[in-house]
Structures are given as structure tokens and as C-alpha cells.
């Protein structure tokens, strides 16, 4: 394992912080609302940083991403220890993108200073909406005002790469509500925006509330209209739509997330985190106690799948279609030898779902298929149709 | 001959017939512990899984009775379901006695009664057995009273047993010897043997099971099958122990098998009489019928490239199952396929399951229907096995449909709702008899088409499972019948066409359209579903266009799960059939059977 893994560049590190103050109704990520095990978790994480180092060898880390859960719950001392361990075990590029997800209610001057000093240079602020009714529906703990203030404060503290999340297609969210959310975002000092359609995942509060009839279900038609508004708004405001749900000012694409869509390697630390080295994928157990216990015994507890060539091809199609970089036919030809077959499959689809682009470079001519704005609405179905058996 | 006992078992599904049979085999040492597995006689996977017997089986046991004499006991295991009632009747005709097994916690069911009547008509000695007496819910005395009422026996004649614990099994074997008469017949008379079943063996061809009533059969005899008129050589004869055991000669009372090199099951008819070419018997054994299928449906491959595979598979199934009939047919919607005839709905389900499981074929089955006789104004009769065979309505004088006599046994509290159901299904009540204070038998006449749909499911739900049902066909009667078509975006999908009584068409059409709206997934365009009689639209539903199909988040932890989900969707798509632009899933084709789910 070591020998071949070394050959592949391990581009990024994802660190999952599995704690939240309260549960948001739509969230199906792994987290606990009890902080009891936080200190034990940090110690286990330090151990995992050490144990997973074997995969990386001497490769350079280009991005680190603290996700969750709620990484802003980490204390200064926790972060200090984590970064010490990371710098000790890995070669981290001097210009590495280091992102931390933060909830507006956790953000204050003191914390921002700690984050800045520890090397964090990108903040992802979980805003979701600037409308109180939406925030209450989603069971968020902060207000719209708090969210605005926290973003301004972060910018004042010297953060010049800030992204926020917004959610559309929320029941009772009108087209005007959604547009006002986008305008508000534009007025704030942010460089990047992730916009997600509210999705009912199984085993969430939202799922159970809908089933019991306690709450309204999101309506596809509304989400679809909101998505069209979003794309038009982005185009008008010079914001780049570089992935189905991700938008940025030129040059501010998330390096870390982009590595997921461009078939780059990454390791995931913490319960439920996924690691990928282009050949196999591993995912840690999604249970804080079991994760901690295993690492106390110097063990990694994970499941693993080895991808077949077809599965790798299908993943390339699925993720590539979602981005502005699209599917590169010469890459398909070179790596998978399926250019003709894929062109035939695309030929059988409704052509208004696609756009294409020819890129000429010294290497030769690249032919790239991307989704049109219309196609973006049906990315899953199209990917599934283009899949190989 | 005086030491032979031939008997079969009558029982309702789940009343423990197969378990008790297993006990008889192990107690007599016919199977050793090593060979023992549940439901020895049910050797098809489907039989074991569903706990039903589809084919008849026979097995010979050696038993030393309390009088210290060795007896040969031939057990003929029979199917319990109404679809196979002809096979049951032939098995019963091959015996002198029957074990009537009744679950002590369930009581007598309709199926049991109709088979019991068959046994009584054949003058069989009946040994009633209360089974599952070890169950906590056993109502031994109450069910014993039901049995006494039904067959007029004495309380002490009813045996008590448990297939599970083995209690009472010795007593059953003793009763078989003591109460069931030895076979009668003339060893020196011309051979008369009745075929009660046949199986297909890929090395030996068709193996027929028979019972000798008169005469003697030797290996190498030249035999003649009376009803089909075919002549064969008796290549091999023998008896059926756990495995076939070859014999040189079999005589009156014996149950055995014969191999004649016949390669196709349909050449051998259950109920036919075997005799010798030299010195043949003068008449056949009574009761032979050429069984006709009662229910017809189209079977089509989902992938039209599988057509030849489907033909091969159906042909192979027919080798084993002579009651399956088929002929090629074409559907505008589904392409090339086969119109198949079945003995009933269970038979259809079994064939569908075997095609999918044993032959790994993706198939679509069109709406099952009964046979209709259509009479034209010119006086011609057209037999309708497929709604699209119906002549132009202006040339039709009348359409006749098959009627059945149905018996339901239930608790008195459910009579009202069952009678409502029966009226809803165009039935007419003809008789109502109390079998005991807690069990009543209702008899009614109704069109057979009504039970092809959801009758049985409805009966089960309104009676909370406390109703058993049995029927037999009586005659054909004229009805106000029409063909209802389904259109998707204006195009007729002939596979959805059904014959229906005009008064029920509106309700049925609107229900079917609603069901199809649920089952057909949203697509990128609007889909109109319409029900029509001729040119007249009688119901309509609309499926709105799908507006989005895209995952919001696709990060490191999502990719694998998402890929697997989309791969699964792709597989699901392969089970869809395309009509114009509209994709219709396989399960939609049987929607018509499950309108009230």
C-alpha cells in the first residue's frame, strides 16, 4: 500500500470535528450535541494525524479543511495542538489554503485572532439565510443580524477569503426572499458563496417532521426556480459558477473542495471522514466513542473500497459534470479508452442539456463537455445515463 | 396386495402437511437423519420458500405394524391450491385413503373442504388428524367438533398430532394400516394404470407416476397410453423410495414410475390410462380431462434482445409443466413476446418467479385475463385470450365470460362485509350454511374475471385473514363487457388494455390512471395518462414534468454514496420500457392487480 500511495500526490487534509451545540433540522452529517468527549476526541485526532502520516510520505499538503460538525467550537489550545501535530507530521505548503467552518454565534474578536494566528486563512461562515423565518425553520441558533455582524467582524480582523453558505428552496421562502438573500450576500465582504437546495435527507429532524406532517416539505418547482434566479444573479454580478452549488469572485475557488471534483487525493481525519488515494477510498467509523477507543489502542477503524476502473470513470463523469471544468474527452481517451462510447452516450441525450468547449494548448486540442444551465438541474440523471456498466 | 396402503394428505396451506409428511418418512426410516431436510417432498425452491406444494410427489415407505407384518405405504403428496385442483383430483383417485390434516389453532378452511368433497366422492377412507396440538392457541375440542360436523365421524376417530414434536405420528401410521382398505383389483386382468403426475428429467426425459388398478406391468412391456393413443416401450419401471428404485414387475395396488423415452411433458397427460398394446383394457379410468388454462397474460422480455432466451426458457419450463401453454404474440407497445395460459393466478406467479429466478430474465407480464367467448352478428364464435383480439365492436353480438361457483368459509361476524364484497364483484349469493357456531360457509356465483383482480387480497383484509376461499368453474354467461384502453400522451399502450364490465369501467379507469400516476416516475415533460373505451376518454391523470434531479452537496464524503446511488438508478432504468418518450417501470404493468394498495 505504502509504495503505490507514495506515487500519488496527497493534495489535501480534511478534519472532521464531530460536535455541535444543537442539531439543525436538515443536517445528516455526523455530529454529537454532547461536548463530553471533546478532549478525548482531540487526543484521538492527534494520534490519527500521526498514524495516517504513513500514507503521505513526503508529499506536500496544499489544503487543510476543518469541517463538521462545528469546528468553531474548538478552543485555542485544541487548535494549537492540532496544528503542531500537523506541521510535525506533514509537509505543508507555505501558501496552503486552510479553511475553518464557523458558526456566526461562535465568532468573536478573540477567536478570530486565535484562528488568524494559527494560520487559518479562509473562513466558511454557516449563514444559511438572512431571513429570520428561514433560520427558525432550519433550527439555527443564530439570528440574521448575528450572521451579518460576524462576517463584517471577520473581514475587519483581516480575513480576506470568506465564504458563506446559503440555503434555497426552503418552505415559504419566496423568490423575492431568495433574491434579497443573494443581494445581502453581495453587499458583504465575501469572496465565495455556496448555495444549496434544501434537501430532505433520511434520519434528519426535517425528514421525521415532514413524515409526521409537522412541517411542510420543500417543493422541487420552487427550488428549481430559485436555482435559475441564482445562476442569473451570479452571471449579472460577475460571479463565477464553478460547481453546481459553488460560486466565487474570480480566482477564489476553494482549492480544497476542488480537489474532490478533480480526482485528487486527500486524507480525512476524524470520525466519518473519507480518505481517497485515487485507487481506494477509506471512511472512518461514524461513531465518536468507537473512534476514540480505537485510537487509544493505536488503531484506525475504517471501511475501505477499492475502485474498479469503471467506478473511477463513473466518478470522473459524475463530479466532472458538476464543474466548469467539465469532462475532458482526451482525458477519457487517455485514461479509460472510452471516448467513442461516451460520445455516443452524450449523443443520445437531449443536446440542450450540454455545452462544449475546445481548448487548444501545446499538449494538443482538448474537447470538453459541460452542463448547460438547463442541464445543471438534471446533473444526477444525466450522470447516471452516462455511466458505464 | 393386501399389505399395500395408498393414501394422500389433504390440508390447507400452513396447516403442517409437509412437516407431518417429513415425520412419517423419518419414523418409518425412509429417510435417514443425514438426508433429512425440511419439506423433503417439496423439492423446488419456490415450494420450500412459500411453504406450498406445486407438483404431486409420491414416496414409498416400509412399515412394520404392531401385528409384526411388513406393509408398503405409498404416500402421494398433492398440491393444495385451487389452481391445481385437477392434479389433486387425480392424486385422490389413486388412493384408498386420506389423512385430513387440520391445524388445531386455525380450524377448517375452504380449500380443505373442497378437496375433502373430492375424497368423499372417490369413497376414500378419511383419517382426520388434528395437527399442531402443541401450539399455545390450539382449540382442540372446538376444531374436533368442526370435523365431526363435517364428516360425521366419532370423536375417538380423530387423531391428535404434532409434526413439530413428532407426537402422535406412530398412531397415524397404525391408523393408515388398520383403517385404510388394501387396494382391490384383478392381477390377471388387462393392465389399467392411471398417471397422476409426471416430472421431467434432463437425462431420462419424462418420468410418469402411476397407480395400477388392474393387471401387471413388466419392464420392456409394449405399452399404450389410452387417451393420447401413443405407443411406447417401458424402458424402465420402478417404485419411488426417496430415490427411484428399479423393479422388473409391478402389479395391482402398486404406485410406481415409468420411463418411456418421451421427451416432452405435454405428450403425457395427467389422468391418462396406461395399458398394454397386446391385450389392452376395454376402457380408460374415469375422470380424465384435458386441462385448459383459465388465465391468460402476455409475457415479454424487457430487453427485446432477450426474446430468444425467453422462448428457450418458457420451452424448458413447459417440459416440466405441461399445464403451461404459450404461443408467440406481438404487442404494438411491447414488441415480440408470448401469450401464455395458466391454471390460475398462483400458477402465473410461479411461472413469473421461475423465469426471473431460474432463468435470470427481466420480463413484463401484461394484465392477466380470463378467456372470453365473443359471438359476432354473423354467428361466429371468437375465443378471446387477449383484449386486442376483440373484433370490431359493431360486429359483436355478445360476449360471454366464464362464471365460477365460489365457497368462502369464515367467522359469522364477517358475513356482512364478505357479502358486500361479493356483490361488488358481481356475485350472487346461492347458499349459506353454518358448519358450527363459529364457522359459516357462504357459496356464491360470480364471473371468474373478478377473482383475477384483487378479490383474494380484499377478502383477506376484510376478514382479517379469517376467511378461506375456493372455487370451480361452472359455465359461460353473457355480460355487458367492453375493452378499456390506456393511453400515454395520446398513444395506446396495448399491454394495459383490459376487458371489463361497462358499469365498472369508469371507476376502474380512474383508479388505474391514479395508480399509474404513482408508478410512472416524473420525466422531463408532462405525461397525460388516459383511460378510454373506444374513442371516448373516461378518465385522465397528469404527471407533471420533473423540474430537478441534482444533488446539492458532493464533497469527499458524498462521492462514493452518490456514485452507488446513481449506478443503482441506472440499473433500475434498465427495467423500464419506453413508449414514445415515456419510460414505464416494469411494476406498472401489474398495477391493475393492486389498485387499492
Image (spheres, coloured by chain):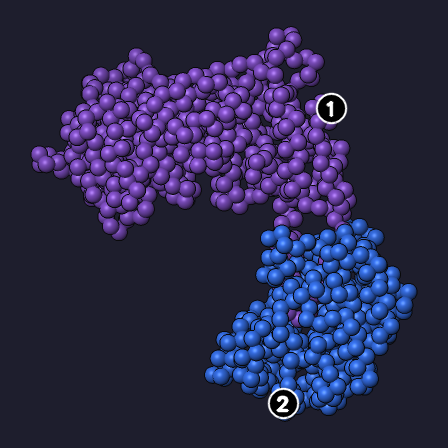
Element marked by disc 2 = helix
- Above or below residue A291? Residue B230 is above
- The image position of residue A63, as x and y in percent, is 72, 81
Judging by the rendered image, the residue that carries numbered circle 2 is A77
Q: Name the image quarter holding residue B117.
A: top left
Say which residue appears at 25% left-offset and 36% top-offset. Answer: B140
Res B536 label: 1
Circle 1 marks a residue in which chain? B
Q: Is residue B297 visible?
A: yes
Circle 2 marks a residue in which chain? A
- Above or below residue B384? Residue B127 is below
Determine the residue located farthest toward the left in the rendered image.
Answer: B67
Disc 2 and disc 1: Cα gap in Å? 78 Å
Res B205 label: none
What shade has chain B been given? purple
- The residue lying toward the viewer, choosing from B235 and B238, is B238
Give the crowd class for mark 1: few <14, some 14-19, many >=20 residues within 10 Å: few
B55 sits left or right of B456 in the view: left
Give the crowd class for mark 2: few <14, some 14-19, many >=20 residues within 10 Å: few
- The image position of residue A356, as x and y in percent, is 84, 60
Amino acid at each position: 500500500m505504502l509504495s503505490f500511495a507514495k506515487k500519488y500526490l496527497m493534495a489535501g487534509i480534511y478534519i472532521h470535528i464531530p460536535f455541535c451545540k444543537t442539531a439543525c433540522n436538515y443536517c445528516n452529517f455526523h455530529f454529537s450535541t454532547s461536548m463530553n468527549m471533546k478532549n478525548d476526541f482531540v487526543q484521538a485526532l492527534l494520534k490519527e494525524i500521526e498514524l495516517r502520516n504513513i500514507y503521505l510520505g513526503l508529499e506536500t499538503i496544499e489544503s487543510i479543511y476543518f469541517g463538521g460538525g462545528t469546528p468553531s467550537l474548538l478552543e485555542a489550545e485544541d487548535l494549537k495542538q492540532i496544528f503542531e501535530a500537523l506541521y510535525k507530521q506533514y509537509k505543508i505548503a507555505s501558501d496552503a489554503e486552510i479553511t475553518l467552518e464557523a458558526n456566526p454565534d461562535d465568532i468573536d474578536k478573540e477567536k478570530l485572532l486565535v484562528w488568524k494566528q494559527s494560520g487559518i486563512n479562509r473562513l466558511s461562515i454557516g449563514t444559511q439565510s438572512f431571513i429570520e423565518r428561514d433560520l427558525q425553520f432550519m433550527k439555527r441558533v443564530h439570528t440574521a443580524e448575528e450572521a451579518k455582524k460576524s462576517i463584517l467582524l471577520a473581514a475587519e480582523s483581516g480575513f480576506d477569503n470568506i465564504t458563506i453558505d446559503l440555503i434555497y428552496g426552503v418552505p415559504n421562502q419566496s423568490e423575492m426572499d431568495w433574491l434579497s438573500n443573494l443581494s445581502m450576500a453581495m453587499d458583504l465582504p465575501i469572496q465565495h458563496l455556496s448555495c444549496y437546495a434544501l434537501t430532505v435527507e433520511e434520519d434528519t429532524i426535517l425528514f421525521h417532521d415532514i413524515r409526521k406532517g409537522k412541517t411542510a416539505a420543500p417543493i422541487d418547482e420552487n427550488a428549481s426556480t430559485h436555482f435559475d434566479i441564482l445562476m442569473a444573479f451570479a452571471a449579472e454580478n460577475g460571479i463565477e459558477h464553478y460547481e453546481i452549488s459553488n460560486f466565487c469572485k474570480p480566482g477564489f475557488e476553494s482549492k480544497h473542495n476542488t480537489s474532490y471534483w478533480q480526482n485528487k487525493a486527500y486524507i480525512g481525519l476524524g470520525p466519518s471522514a473519507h480518505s481517497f488515494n485515487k485507487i481506494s477510498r477509506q471512511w472512518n467509523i461514524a461513531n465518536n466513542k468507537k473512534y476514540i477507543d480505537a485510537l487509544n489502542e493505536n488503531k484506525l477503524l475504517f471501511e475501505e473500497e477499492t475502485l474498479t476502473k469503471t467506478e473511477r470513470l463513473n466518478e470522473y463523469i459524475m463530479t466532472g459534470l458538476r464543474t466548469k471544468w467539465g469532462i475532458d474527452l482526451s482525458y477519457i481517451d487517455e485514461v479509460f479508452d472510452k471516448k467513442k462510447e461516451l460520445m455516443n452516450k452524450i449523443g443520445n441525450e437531449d443536446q440542450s442539456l450540454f455545452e462544449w468547449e475546445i481548448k487548444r494548448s501545446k499538449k494538443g486540442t482538448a474537447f470538453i463537455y459541460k452542463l448547460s444551465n438547463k442541464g445543471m438541474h438534471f446533473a444526477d440523471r444525466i450522470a447516471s445515463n452516462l455511466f458505464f456498466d | 396386495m393386501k399389505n399395500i396402503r395408498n393414501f394422500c394428505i389433504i390440508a390447507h396451506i400452513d396447516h403442517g402437511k409437509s412437516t407431518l409428511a417429513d415425520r412419517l418418512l423419518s419414523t418409518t426410516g425412509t429417510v435417514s437423519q443425514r438426508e433429512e431436510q425440511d419439506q423433503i417432498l417439496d423439492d423446488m425452491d419456490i415450494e420450500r420458500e412459500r411453504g406450498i406444494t406445486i407438483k404431486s410427489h409420491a414416496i414409498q415407505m416400509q412399515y412394520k405394524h404392531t401385528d409384526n407384518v411388513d406393509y408398503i405405504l405409498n404416500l402421494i403428496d398433492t398440491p393444495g391450491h385451487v389452481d391445481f385442483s385437477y392434479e389433486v383430483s387425480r392424486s385422490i383417485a389413486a388412493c384408498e385413503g386420506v389423512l385430513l390434516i387440520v391445524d388445531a389453532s386455525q380450524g377448517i378452511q375452504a380449500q380443505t373442504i373442497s378437496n375433502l368433497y373430492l375424497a368423499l366422492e372417490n369413497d376414500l377412507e378419511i383419517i382426520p388428524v388434528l395437527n399442531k396440538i402443541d401450539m399455545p392457541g390450539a382449540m382442540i375440542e372446538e376444531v374436533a367438533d368442526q370435523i365431526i360436523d363435517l364428516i360425521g365421524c366419532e370423536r375417538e376417530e380423530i387423531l391428535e398430532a404434532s409434526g413439530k414434536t413428532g407426537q402422535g405420528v406412530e398412531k397415524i401410521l397404525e391408523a393408515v394400516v388398520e383403517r385404510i382398505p388394501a387396494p382391490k383389483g384383478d392381477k390377471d386382468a388387462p393392465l389399467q394404470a392411471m398417471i397422476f403426475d409426471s416430472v421431467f428429467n434432463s437425462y431420462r426425459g419424462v418420468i410418469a407416476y402411476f397407480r395400477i388398478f388392474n393387471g401387471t406391468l413388466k419392464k420392456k412391456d409394449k405399452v399404450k397410453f389410452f387417451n393420447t393413443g401413443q405407443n411406447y416401450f417401458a424402458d424402465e419401471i420402478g417404485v419411488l423410495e426417496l430415490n427411484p428404485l428399479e423393479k422388473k414387475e409391478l402389479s395391482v395396488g402398486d404406485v410406481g414410475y415409468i420411463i418411456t423415452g418421451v421427451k416432452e411433458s405435454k405428450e403425457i397427460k395427467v389422468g391418462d390410462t396406461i395399458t398394454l398394446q397386446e391385450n389392452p383394457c376395454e376402457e380408460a379410468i374415469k375422470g380424465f380431462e384435458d386441462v385448459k388454462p383459465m388465465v391468460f397474460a402476455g409475457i415479454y422480455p424487457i430487453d427485446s434482445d432477450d426474446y430468444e432466451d425467453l422462448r428457450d426458457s418458457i420451452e424448458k419450463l413447459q417440459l416440466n409443466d405441461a399445464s403451461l401453454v404459450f404461443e408467440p404474440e406481438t404487442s404494438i407497445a411491447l414488441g415480440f413476446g408470448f401469450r401464455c395460459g395458466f391454471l390460475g393466478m398462483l400458477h402465473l406467479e410461479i411461472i413469473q418467479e421461475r423465469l426471473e429466478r431460474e432463468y435470470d430474465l427481466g420480463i413484463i407480464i401484461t394484465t392477466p385475463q380470463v378467456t372470453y367467448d365473443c359471438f359476432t352478428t354473423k354467428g361466429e364464435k371468437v375465443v378471446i385470450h387477449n383484449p386486442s383480439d376483440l373484433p370490431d365492436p359493431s360486429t359483436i353480438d355478445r360476449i360471454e365470460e366464464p362464471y365460477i361457483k365460489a365457497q368462502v368459509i369464515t367467522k359469522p361476524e364477517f358475513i356482512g362485509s364478505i357479502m358486500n364484497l361479493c356483490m361488488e364483484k358481481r356475485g350472487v349469493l346461492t347458499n349459506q350454511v353454518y358448519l358450527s357456531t363459529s364457522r359459516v360457509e357462504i357459496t356464491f356465483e360470480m364471473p371468474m374475471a373478478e377473482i383475477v383482480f384483487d378479490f383474494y387480497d380484499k377478502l383477506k383484509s376484510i376478514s382479517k385473514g379469517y376467511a378461506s376461499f375456493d372455487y370451480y368453474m361452472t359455465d359461460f354467461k353473457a355480460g355487458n363487457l367492453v375493452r378499456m384502453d390506456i393511453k400515454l400522451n395520446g398513444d395506446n399502450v396495448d399491454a394495459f388494455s383490459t376487458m371489463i364490465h361497462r358499469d365498472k369501467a369508469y371507476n376502474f379507469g380512474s383508479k388505474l390512471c391514479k395508480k399509474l400516476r404513482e408508478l410512472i416516475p416524473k420525466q422531463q415533460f408532462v405525461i397525460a395518462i388516459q383511460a378510454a373505451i373506444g374513442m371516448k376518454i373516461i378518465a385522465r391523470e397528469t404527471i407533471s414534468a420533473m423540474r430537478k434531479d441534482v444533488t446539492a452537496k458532493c464533497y469527499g464524503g458524498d462521492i462514493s454514496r452518490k456514485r452507488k446511488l446513481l449506478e443503482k438508478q441506472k440499473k433500475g432504468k434498465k427495467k423500464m420500457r419506453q413508449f414514445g418518450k415515456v419510460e414505464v417501470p416494469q411494476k406498472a404493468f401489474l398495477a391493475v392487480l393492486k389498485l387499492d394498495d
